[in-house]
Image (cartoon, rainbow, N blue to C red):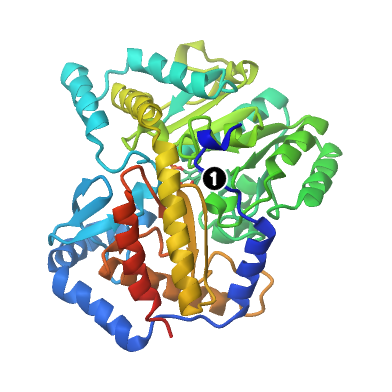
């Protein structure tokens, strides 16, 4: 592996980050001064009237007023009408630097014309879907296989959630074992079996409202970086039918919000081999964003199965897939080839010409333009700029990046420890601060993911990044 080929120029010091996280959540929160927060909220009152009206109307028909967590914003969601490269515009005509980047898929930048135009050509020819095979399904599978040889075969599905479901089902079918071990805090979509230990390690079924206990009966979690815990669980399971799979987000739970040691994946691989368990890499975020070889290329670790999402359809709908060893992948049925031994997956709109062509052209363009690396360099520059601001202002906050995935930790809502005596109070206060930080960044013209995660893209030139740093500086200068 050459660092030239991957977006991560330097793996952060994981232990130092874990210590900083502990420090952050052991201190009282440092929110924005009330007078300044009032000023930021005024921005929404005076400059976002059309957004407010539209999303208030939406709340009458759409639960919570938005269809997706990412779109939830304090004090109200923005209605976006235009996206171009590093920028978004709302319906009131305000422009924002976009570090949400749709939650990660748009490494080329938003609404990249080189993909959009090709997609339109395909749409003109055959529309978004026919239900029958389209040549871009093959082209996409070939492309993925070329960049990630461990993906000997590829099955496209509709989302990352579906990809995780399918990978786990195939692992169970192939191994004949039931248990699945995940790393606490990781997000593997919202399927019944995976809403366990979500967001906060050790939280078990805390978020599993509406999900019968039996659905997570075979889901287990270990703490991030706890290889001894993983071994112990594998040993325990061996006496009780075995473990079908260990599933990881390779840079750590919640896209590295809980960072893992560089050698974690290799050691997890060795344990899986020892216990005859499959290793699933959830590369929904990292696949192609970290580099054309994904996290598996960066770490030099070969998973048995890989889950794809986001980049796999270049930001277009229908972004999900599973790839991996041909013997495991061959257990998937596709309709007519099914039978009792086959792993059933499907989806009327899965692998549509639209998704397959968008994925093919996006990944082709990412390779041609070196987008993952350029996005990673933008992440490095943004991280360095924000670190300087934090240092200059003497704040107890911290920032780090894995290439184009950046964490600006000010409130630590996802960093709390389940054993804290005042856990619920901590969660409430820190969530409130997260919302306020997000709103303040927005009022300064920068959109983030939940006020702490930032995705950079190839479109983030030095000028865009430096402009953003100054906007963050204004917000961070105003904390109590
Ligand atoms: C690591 C990871 N896995 C799975 C998913 C679920 O993907 P989707 O939202 O496409 O269902 C996500 C979504 O953010 C993710 O970050």
Label 1: few (<14), some (14–19) or many (≥20) C-alpha neighbours in 10 Å? some
Give residue 437's position: percent from left, percent from top: 39, 71
Give residue 17's position: percent from left, percent from top: 62, 62
Q: Residue at x 62, y 68 (%)?
A: 20
Q: In this rendering, is residue 475 above or below 16?
A: below
Q: Badge 1 is on which residue? A: 9
The one nearer the camera, 183 or 371, is 371
Q: In this rendering, is residue 169 above or below 338?
A: below
Q: Is residue 417 visible?
A: no
Give residue 438's position: percent from left, percent from top: 36, 67
Give residue 53's position: percent from left, percent from top: 15, 66
Q: Is residue 474 visible?
A: yes
Q: Quadrant of the C terminus?
A: bottom left
Label 1: which secondary element: loop
User: In the drawing, does residue 339 fall left or right of residue 48?
Assistant: right
Examine the image and state in which quarter residue 449 appears.
bottom left
Q: Residue at x 66, y 49 (%)?
A: 183
Q: In this rendering, is residue 266 above or below 132?
A: below
Q: Residue at x 58, y 74 (%)?
A: 24
The one nearer the camera, 347 or 443, is 443
Q: Quadrant of the N terminus?
A: top right
Q: Residue at x 52, y 18 (%)?
A: 333
User: In the drawing, does residue 93 fall left or right of residue 351?
Assistant: left
User: In the drawing, does residue 477 fall left or right of residue 215?
Assistant: left
Q: Residue furthest bottom?
A: 35
Q: Is the CB atom of the residue marked by disc 1 within 8 angstroms of ligand 1's nearest atom? A: no
Number of numbered tags placed on the structure image: 1
Examine the image and state in which quarter residue 346 appears.
top left
User: In the drawing, does residue 227 fall left or right of residue 33?
Assistant: right
């Amino acid at each position: 592996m050459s660092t030239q080929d991957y977006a991560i120029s330097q793996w952060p010091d994981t232990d130092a980050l874990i210590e900083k996280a502990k420090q952050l959540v052991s201190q009282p929160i440092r929110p924005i001064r009330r007078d300044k927060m009032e000023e930021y909220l005024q921005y929404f009152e005076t400059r976002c009237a059309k957004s407010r009206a539209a999303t208030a109307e939406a709340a009458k028909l759409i639960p919570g007023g938005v269809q997706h967590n990412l779109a939830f914003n304090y004090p109200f969601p923005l209605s976006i009408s235009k996206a171009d490269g590093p920028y978004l515009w709302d319906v009131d005509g305000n422009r924002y630097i976009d570090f949400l980047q749709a939650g990660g898929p748009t490494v080329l930048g938003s609404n990249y014309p080189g993909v959009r135009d090709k997609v339109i050509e395909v749409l003109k020819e055959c529309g978004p879907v026919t239900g029958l095979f389209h040549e871009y399904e093959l082209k996409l599978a070939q492309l993925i296989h070329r960049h990630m040889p461990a993906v000997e075969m590829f099955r496209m599905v509709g989302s990352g959630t579906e990809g995780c479901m399918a990978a786990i089902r195939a692992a169970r079918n192939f191994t004949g074992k039931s248990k699945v071990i995940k790393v606490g805090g990781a997000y593997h979509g919202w399927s019944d079996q995976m809403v366990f230990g979500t967001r906060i390690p050790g939280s078990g079924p805390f978020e599993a409202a509406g999900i019968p206990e039996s659905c997570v009966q075979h889901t287990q979690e270990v703490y991030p970086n706890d290889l001894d815990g993983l071994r112990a669980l594998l040993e325990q399971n061996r006496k009780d039918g075995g473990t079908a799979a260990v599933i990881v987000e390779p840079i750590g739970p919640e896209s590295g919000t809980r960072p893992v040691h560089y050698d974690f994946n290799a050691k997890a691989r060795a344990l899986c081999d020892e216990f005859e368990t499959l290793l699933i890499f959830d590369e929904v975020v990292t696949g192609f964003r970290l580099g054309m070889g994904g996290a598996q290329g960066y770490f030099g670790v070969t998973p048995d199965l890989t889950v794809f999402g986001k980049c796999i359809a270049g930001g277009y709908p229908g972004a999900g897939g599973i790839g991996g060893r041909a013997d495991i992948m061959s257990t998937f049925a596709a309709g007519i080839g099914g039978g009792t031994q086959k792993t059933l997956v499907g989806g009327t709109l899965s692998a549509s010409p639209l998704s397959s062509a968008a994925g093919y052209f996006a990944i082709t363009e990412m390779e041609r333009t070196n987008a993952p690396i350029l996005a990673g360099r933008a992440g490095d520059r943004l991280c360095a700029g924000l670190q300087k601001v934090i240092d200059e202002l003497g704040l107890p906050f911290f920032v780090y990046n894995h290439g184009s995935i950046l964490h600006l930790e000010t409130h630590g809502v996802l960093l709390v420890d389940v054993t804290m005596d005042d856990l619920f109070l901590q969660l409430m206060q820190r969530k409130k601060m997260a919302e306020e930080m997000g709103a303040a960044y927005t009022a300064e013209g920068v959109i983030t993911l939940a006020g702490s995660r930032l995705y950079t893209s190839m479109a983030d030139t030095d000028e865009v990044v430096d402009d953003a740093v100054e906007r963050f500086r204004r917000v961070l200068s105003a904390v109590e």
